[in-house]
Image (tube, rainbow, N blue to C red):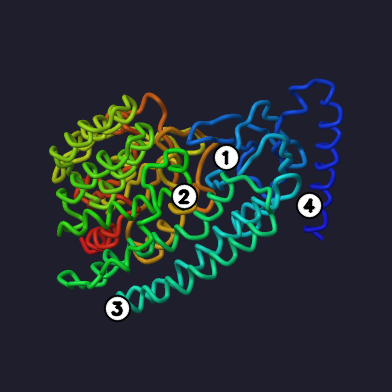
Amino acid sequence: MGIYVNNFKLKILFITLLSTLIAGCDTKSSCNSTYFGGNIINPKSDYVVLYKNEIPLDTFFLDKNNSFLGEIPALHEGLYNFKHGEEEQYIYLNPKDSLLIRLNTWKFDETLVFSGVGAERNNLLIDSFLESEKDSKVFIQYFKLSPSDFNSKIIQAEKIKLDRYEDYVSKHPNETDKFKNVFKIALTYPLYSKIENYPLARSARGNYNENLDTSNYFYKHREHITLDNDSLMYFYAYRNYVLNYMYNKVNSLGHDINSNEFTINLLNTISTELSDVSSKNSMMRKIFIRHFYWNSLNTINKKTVNTFLKHNTNSTDRKLITNLTLDVEKINEGSFLEDFNITDYNKTQRSIKKLTKNENSVLYFWNSKYIGKNFIAKRIQFFSEKYPNLKFIGVKINGDYKDRIYKLDIKSQYYLEKTSKAHTFLTSQIPRTILINEKGVVVNSYASLSSRRIFKQIEDLAKN
């Protein structure tokens, strides 16, 4: 019944779109416009944002039926992405397209379907994305194979992808070269990423000193890949390949992936390999934060910071990392946590010292810009069940009483008002987790919920 109702809504929206197009063709500009709309089941917010290369182009608000429809007057052919709540996905748009989406946020990617002008291309891309996700699960077991056997699996999978590509091209002789290129990348680059990731995956399995015979045939795909295509750098398949290639290149130097030397060499490699300033800055910012999270410690190597500041030219990025460095220094491990107020969802200010008194506590500050609510919920639910003797306190850094994580107990959730002293050590607004023992002493001032090390760190706190 639900599917019928939502299909009916989509048909109504499509009729509305056609009426808009017909009525709008009184002017030349309206006839050349591109339309993007759709229906969202179980919406997480009241709007959808359309982006081009991480830059927001427009915001479309949902109506009472959870539908939206937007006009883009002067659009250039290419890849775009839209975001709703914490989820996002790519779409390919041509001038004069009238693309409609339908999805259920409970299974965002799996339920996403397209209709209207431009739908076939986008259904191909979402199918390719979902298939690459399945491939990733299958290939986990292949990383234990020898290079030649692993390469055979790649060749088999590549043939299937390329046959699909050729079939589409032969049946669509008027397809644009731009889309054909994007479609081929969506099909094949996730496979090539797995090749680049193979040596790292072997190391992760404990084969640190293994001498892999990865002859020229193993990296044959590199012959037809250009690393510096800035127009595709924000497309997941292309970006992930470039990143995996760089990780593999730095890994070949013999550095431990968790070391400062690895991070420094990776930042240098990004600076050398990429020429597009925007892509370079964006990738370096994400890498710096990612590696900082991995450590789950209150230390930032000065040489790593200086390398970042040497290469990154974006003033916002530079300020972010500078503030992060200062935030780390604001709280010392082994000291008592200074008191500050957090606000509960009854709008009552609470003292952090009173909340954590005589209890081993995990105080996690979060920001949806850097970490998803669903991810936080799963981690905290897991830890809460495993360590019931610990107290978990969640604090939204830049939030208010309207925003919280609904899958977690509201009694354990808080937010910061602008006057809270906690902002003095959260100037970067990057999430941080502080582990406090029952005596009120900080045992880790900058742990990370997304780090593998957090499991051991929380276990140690529970044993305290």
First in sequence, mark 1 or 4: give its number: 4
* Callouts 1 and 3 close, C-beta under 8 Å: no
User: Measuring 63% from the left and 36% from the top, which residue is drawn there?
Assistant: 47
First in sequence, mark 2 or 1: give its number: 1
As rendered, which of 290 and 265 lies closer to the eye? 265
Residue 305: % across, % down: 19, 36
Secondary element at tag 1: strand
Q: Amino acid at mark 4?
A: Asn
Residue 440: % across, % down: 22, 46
Secondary element at tag 3: loop
* Callouts 2 and 4 close, C-beta under 8 Å: no
For residue 331, above or below residue 126: above
Question: In this view of the protein, can residue 203 be seen by the observer?
Answer: yes
Q: Amino acid at mark 3?
A: Ser
Which one is closest to the eye, mark 3 or mark 2?
Answer: 3
* Callouts 1 and 4 close, C-beta under 8 Å: no
Disc 3: which residue:
146
The disc at residue 78 is 1
Disc 4: which residue:
6
The disc at residue 238 is none
Which one is closest to the eye, mark 2 or mark 4?
Answer: 2
Q: Amino acid at mark 1?
A: Gly
Disc 2: which residue:
236
For residue 307, above or below residue 163: above
Compute the Cα span from label 2 to label 4. 29 Å
Q: Quadrant of the C terminus?
A: bottom left
